[in-house]
Image (tube, coloured by chain):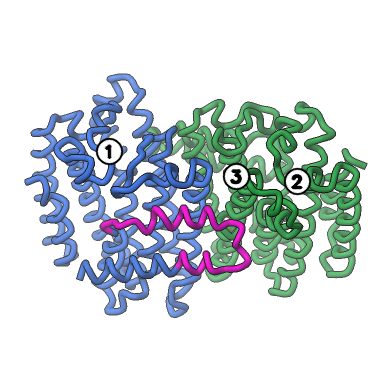
Chain colours: A blue, B green
């Protein structure tokens, strides 16, 4: 199932970029489109897209209706990777095992590629979602996308993350602060992914909220695993530079609680997620497989 | 009329940023919100917002319905200014007579502020537009916003602009190329401004297209005037660094046709616009005043 989802996301993403590149009216903006395509189409797990499709499938047989949104979410995720890797941000030369966008296309085109991915994703949700879906439902889905993209989502989390690097010990000792960073930097996009799938699948608000609760908890576990892997893995295994968090004085679970402390927290978080998945009537083998996959290299 | 429009746009923009800054849940992302507010709320002509409100008023007495969109368009415009001024882009330290966003808040927060303005503008169109407007009309307006923001709009034009700086003489001699840059870098956002106002005002597609035609021609005239002013004005008058276009080998009307040639072209363009404004049944004193204002310092 996950493989099938991944395949259709990869193929559809490619087709969207080919459509722009083949548009003769827009030959002169080719370089930015290529930069957008480069990072978005690098081999990735497509977790956000898969969560979106599966969240739709839970409520509707026709999960195909969520494919454009799944691709839009992957574009938004790629945007955040491209801008995060910039020299003035996290300054990382490696992403998904390949040179970062700005290393290949230069900083200016990497900035433009990120900018254009934000609006392209939203445009795709409008243009490519089946005309059978009523406009108020598309607006509702779009709103989730936009919120996760901005100051109430990824950008808010990234801001807090950058502030933590330069902040006084006082702020760093604040438990709430680390939670804020992870909720907005990581969980926000997972929450939007599940919410959009559920909305397009016709779920009511109660069901949408249940899925969001799962996605939020999953995001925290995902970030804990990411922080742990940064310490215990090699750069080759990660596909991005290993050991950067400590070097840059990032406020991570490992830097705050130590490696063993972070592992304990992750174990507790996984139990919490399993609890949510059993109680809240959001049963899905795909969700369980995804949760298991993020800890596979740790325990 | 223009002054009234400007006032309501300025006040509403301020209130939107205050709303975010007063949101206690988002204290930790304050720095980026302040960077967004800083550039957006600097004294500006609010041309895009004014065009949007007037385009709505032509078709509906209740132009208030377009106020959130007018503010959204000013946010999008500010986004393009913030990212254009970055060191890896046009590298300008001055904007609207004040230090550029990245000079005040640093590069990373300027990048994040731009990113968040794109999605915030779109979110405001959804959240703040009167609930009396049917969702399909809001989607239609939103689509214009998104197209102008991305690869089919500002980003496309900015890409071609950057490519021209480094390109062979061959490409620079191509008349079509300069037109592409100006159509997408400058006209696209004016076109979206008029289209969104008209859509929210209830205009049919024929009327929307007529307004877009005006906006496109106006955008070209605006850019010609901008290129001319870059040469004949002081930095203080412009509020941004004067004389940069020549220095950076930009493909502008002045660099291509000389100062006198560009002035001649601007005169012809203004006549063309007046022609559109009389024939196409898009009569508006506000539009005429705006057209006159851009040439006031030149002829």
- Write the start and end of the magenta stretch as one range: A16-45
The reply to whether discs 1 and 3 touch (Cβ–Cβ < 8 Å) is: no
Quadrant of the rendered image containing residue B259: top right
Q: Residues within 10 Å of mark 2 (few under 14, many from 20)?
A: many
Q: Residues within 10 Å of mark 3 (few under 14, many from 20)?
A: many
- Which type of secondary structure does the marked residue at label 2 adopt? loop
Instruction: Return the residue at label 1.
Output: A241
* Residues at marks 3 and 2, CA–CA distance in whole angstroms: 18 Å
The residue under label 2 is B252
Q: What subunit carries mark 3?
A: B
Q: Are marks 2 and 1 in contact (CB under 8 Å)?
A: no
Residue visible at 61% across and 46% down in the picture? B162
Which mark lies nearer to you, 1 or 3?
Answer: 1
Nearer-the-camera pick, B293 or A259: A259
Q: Which residue is mark 3?
A: B80
Residue B203: which quarter of the image? bottom right
Placement of A81 over or under B66, stated as above or below: above
* Residue A109 visible in the displayed image: yes
Between residue B246 and residue A13, name the one nearer to us.
Answer: B246
Q: Nearer the viewer, mark 3 or mark 2?
A: 2
Work out whether A72 lies above or below A273: below
x then y, percent, for residue A115? 50, 49
| Residue B127 appears in view | no
Q: Nearer the viewer, residue B20 or A250?
A: A250
Residue visible at 47% across and 39% down in the picture: B112
């Amino acid at each position: 199932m996950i493989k099938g989802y991944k395949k259709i996301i990869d193929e559809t993403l490619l087709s969207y970029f080919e459509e722009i590149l083949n548009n003769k009216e827009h030959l002169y903006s080719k370089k930015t489109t290529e930069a957008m395509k480069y990072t978005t189409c690098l081999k990735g797990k497509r977790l956000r897209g898969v969560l979106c499709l599966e969240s739709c499938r839970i409520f509707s047989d026709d999960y195909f209706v969520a494919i454009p949104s799944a691709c839009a979410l992957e574009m938004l995720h790629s945007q955040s990777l491209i801008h995060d890797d910039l020299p003035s941000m996290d300054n990382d030369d490696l992403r998904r095992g390949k040179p970062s966008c700005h290393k290949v296309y230069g900083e200016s085109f990497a900035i433009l590629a990120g900018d254009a991915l934000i609006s392209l994703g939203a445009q795709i949700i409008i243009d490519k979602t089946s005309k059978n879906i009523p406009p108020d439902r598309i607006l509702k889905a779009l709103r989730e996308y936009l919120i996760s993209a901005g100051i109430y989502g990824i950008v808010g989390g990234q801001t807090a993350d950058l502030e933590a690097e330069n902040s006084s010990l006082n702020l760093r000792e604040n438990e709430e602060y680390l939670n804020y960073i992870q909720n907005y930097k990581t969980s926000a996009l997972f929450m939007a992914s599940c919410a959009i799938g559920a909305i397009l699948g016709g779920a009511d608000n109660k069901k949408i909220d249940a899925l969001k609760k799962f996605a939020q908890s999953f995001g925290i576990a995902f970030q804990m695993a990411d922080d742990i892997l940064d310490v215990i893995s090699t750069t080759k295994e990660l596909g991005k530079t290993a050991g950067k968090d400590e070097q840059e004085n990032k406020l991570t679970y490992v830097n705050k609680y130590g490696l063993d402390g972070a592992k304990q927290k992750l174990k507790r978080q996984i139990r919490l997620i399993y609890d949510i998945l059993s109680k809240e009537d959001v049963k899905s083998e795909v969700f369980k497989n995804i949760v298991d996959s993020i800890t596979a290299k740790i325990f």
